[in-house]
Amino acid sequence: MQKGLTFIIIGIFLLLMLGLGISVALSSFFPGAPLQISSEPIPLTQQLNILIVEVNDLSIPNPVLISAWGMFFSRSKQQPSIIFQILTPDKGDEAQSQLANNFELKPGKIPSSGFMDKTLSANHLSKPWDAYILVDHEGLQKFSDWSGMSSNQTLETFLPELCYQMENSDSIPEITFHWGEIIPNHLKTNLSFETAVMIWDTAFHSPKKIFCDVYHQ
């Protein structure tokens, strides 16, 4: 059970708390990590659509796209939920090739608007992304090593296990992790601190246990 609880914290902080918020307020959580402040705070709405992009290595000049996922979060009082949907088809598919060809990071390792728009149109989604999260294999590996999880994790294997643990665990363990080892070279996001805290509270402090699932095309 303790291992499972640890895994929840790994997953949620991997996807929501990296590179966030107000540096003074968060310095106690992330000692030594060069945190960034989102220049355009995301409104605390009932639903958020977040683009998650997995690449091979964020520390190199031109990272290669591995996969893209949509995270669809709802804090409905009736049934809070997090749905992960893969946006990149199987390798070799024409749509996959088009997304890979449109993949581009602007200076500062920010996903280009062209790529973000393409992930929407290729999957028949109309609502623009509220935020993005970039993660590479090194970031996933460091979390795996720290938690005792299996090595060589990808988002395709990571997210289903995360959902299972979120739905089947009841408490949150103490967090200890050297975030400076992965921020900003292996994990980046424009989520604000307030938004991350809101998602966290909904996931773990909602009167109703959150529903979580992973959809594959």
Image: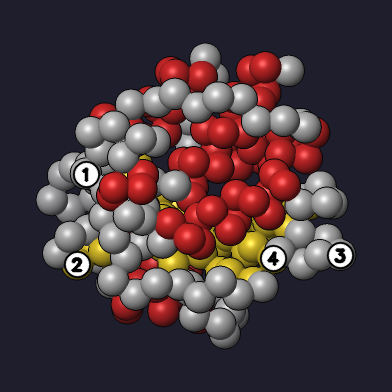
Q: Is residue 81 visible?
A: yes
Residue ID for mark 3: 78
Quadrant including the N terminus: top right
Residue ID for mark 4: 74
Name which quarter of the figure residue 131 lies in.
bottom left
Q: Residue at the location (17% across, 60% down)?
A: 108
Residue 34 picture location, percent across and down: 21, 44
Q: Residue 62: give its label.
A: none
What is the C-alpha distance between the residues marked 1 and 4?
30 Å
Amino acid type of disc 2? Lys
Give the number of the mark in front: 1 or 4: 1
Q: Who is closer to the viewer here, 114 or 178? A: 178
Q: Residue at the location (25% across, 38% down)?
A: 33
Residue ID for mark 1: 34
What is the C-alpha distance between the residues marked 3 and 1?
38 Å
What is the C-alpha distance between the residues marked 3 and 4?
10 Å
Residue ID for mark 2: 106
Element assignment for label 3: loop
The residue most toward the front is 24
Amino acid type of disc 3? Gln
The correct choice, above or below, for 50 with respect to 203 in the image is: below
What is the C-alpha distance between the residues marked 2 and 4?
29 Å
Q: Earlier in the sequence, mark 2 or mark 4?
A: 4
Mark 1 surroundings: few (<14), some (14-19) or many (≥20) residues within 10 A? some
Element assignment for label 2: strand
Q: Are marks 1 and 4 in contact (CB under 8 Å)?
A: no
Amino acid type of disc 4? Ser
Q: Earlier in the sequence, mark 3 or mark 1?
A: 1
Amino acid type of disc 1? Pro
Q: Earlier in the sequence, mark 3 or mark 2?
A: 3
What is the C-alpha distance between the residues marked 1 and 2?
19 Å
Q: Are marks 1 and 2 in contact (CB under 8 Å)?
A: no
